[in-house]
Image: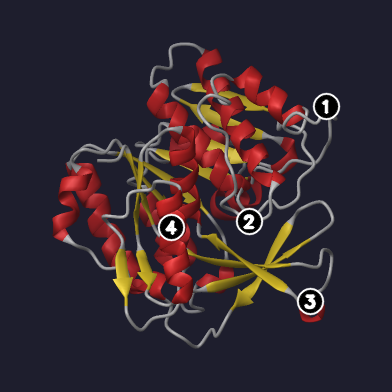
Amino acid sequence: MSQVICLGESLMDRIADEVGQELNLIQNWTNFPGGAPANVACALSRLGTSSSFLGCISRDTFGEELISTLRFYDVDRSLVQRHLTAITRQVLVTRDARGGRAFGGFNQSHQVFADSQLSFRKQDASFFSSASFLYLGSLILAEPQCRSAVEQYLQMAQFHGLQIFMDVNLRPMFWHASDSSKSIIFKVLAHINYLKVASEEAQWLFETQNPTQICDRFPKLQGVFVTAGDQGCHYQLHGFSGACPAFSVQSIDTTGAGDGFVAGCLHQLLTCPTFSHPSHAESLVRYANAVGGLSTLHIGAIAPDPTPKMSSNSSKMAKAILYNLGSGRQTSNNHNG
């Protein structure tokens, strides 16, 4: 059984080969497995924390590749649901010269995507009974059927005493025009224990980027992480607040930086669950920044993350980042949003 259940979407990031081009001018694309919950599950497994993926995946060719990716990273697939006719969602991703990314829509947007077909299954309870954390991203809430399933899985998680970690990802193209994404996300936040949100998302959702103010609005929140790319992270964690700078790396693709950050947080929350001093909170965020930074050194969200040996403490991680995995050359431009 796994320590963390990652609930949500698994899809293909269709990343532009040409850097700095407008969407309509790009001629060549490369597919990479993605979807925040799948990214986090793979990163956790690489860090040495057992993980399960809970989501719906197509039986098309891309879906088989997604399953193979989860298998390769030793992510438990017992909770995966498969769909015979719905296709795998492909998200168009463009990159700028600094590794920043923008999302440009979907393939065949009129089709039904498998990730939107998640349903609740009572028999999954046995996996929840032995887990410690449930992780979910906000995009799974965009579809009514998925929202219903998520609500029931949240109840299951709370019944079995799991801590719940949520990452808010604002992707308007996922949401139906008639839906109020803010009110839907707020409803779920009432159940959340840990929250990661990028600074611009925090401003949109809460009208503040102050993690302490956000934490005070939701009684169950024990930790809030407000990430700001190469500006690092402001946090409120178990009563301790602070800011932690990002590591400087030469980013190639920041698509999975936030997911790497989340994996680092979850791994540390499980490894070092006691917070009796401000340095404990700072150490966790520093570690998460490091994992997020390393994830930007490769194209694609699911990239080689640090192994437990590499990640045994923050100073080793910092050295790996600052010297670009042993190149001996300090570089710049990291994003962990």
The residue tagged 4 is 185
The residue tagged 1 is 328
Q: Which comes sooner in the sequence, label 2 or label 1?
A: 2
Disc 2 to disc 1, C-alpha distance: 24 Å
The residue tagged 3 is 26
Q: Secondary structure at mark 1?
A: loop
Q: Which comes sooner in the sequence, label 1 or label 3?
A: 3
Q: Which comes sooner in the sequence, label 3 or label 4?
A: 3
Q: Secondary structure at mark 4?
A: helix
Label 3: few (<14), some (14–19) or many (≥20) C-alpha neighbours in 10 Å: some
Q: Secondary structure at mark 3?
A: loop
The residue tagged 2 is 300
Mark 4–mark 2 contact, CB under 8 Å?
A: no
Is any atom of residue 137 visible in this view?
Answer: no
Mark 3–mark 4 contact, CB under 8 Å?
A: no
Q: Is residue 111 above or below residue 206?
A: below
Q: Is residue 201 above or below residue 194?
A: below
Q: Which comes sooner in the sequence, label 1 or label 4?
A: 4
Quarter-wise, where is residue 290 in the image?
Answer: top right
Residue 37 placed where, x, y %? 45, 53
Three-letter residue code for mark 4? Ile
Q: Which comes sooner in the sequence, label 4 or label 2?
A: 4
Relative placement, left or right, of 250 versus 234 is: right
Three-letter residue code for mark 1? Gly
Which of the two discs, 1 and 4, sits closer to the camera?
Answer: 1
Three-letter residue code for mark 3? Ile
Disc 3 to disc 2, C-alpha distance: 17 Å
Which of the two discs, 3 and 4, sits closer to the camera?
Answer: 3
Q: Residue at x 55, y 85 (%)?
A: 108
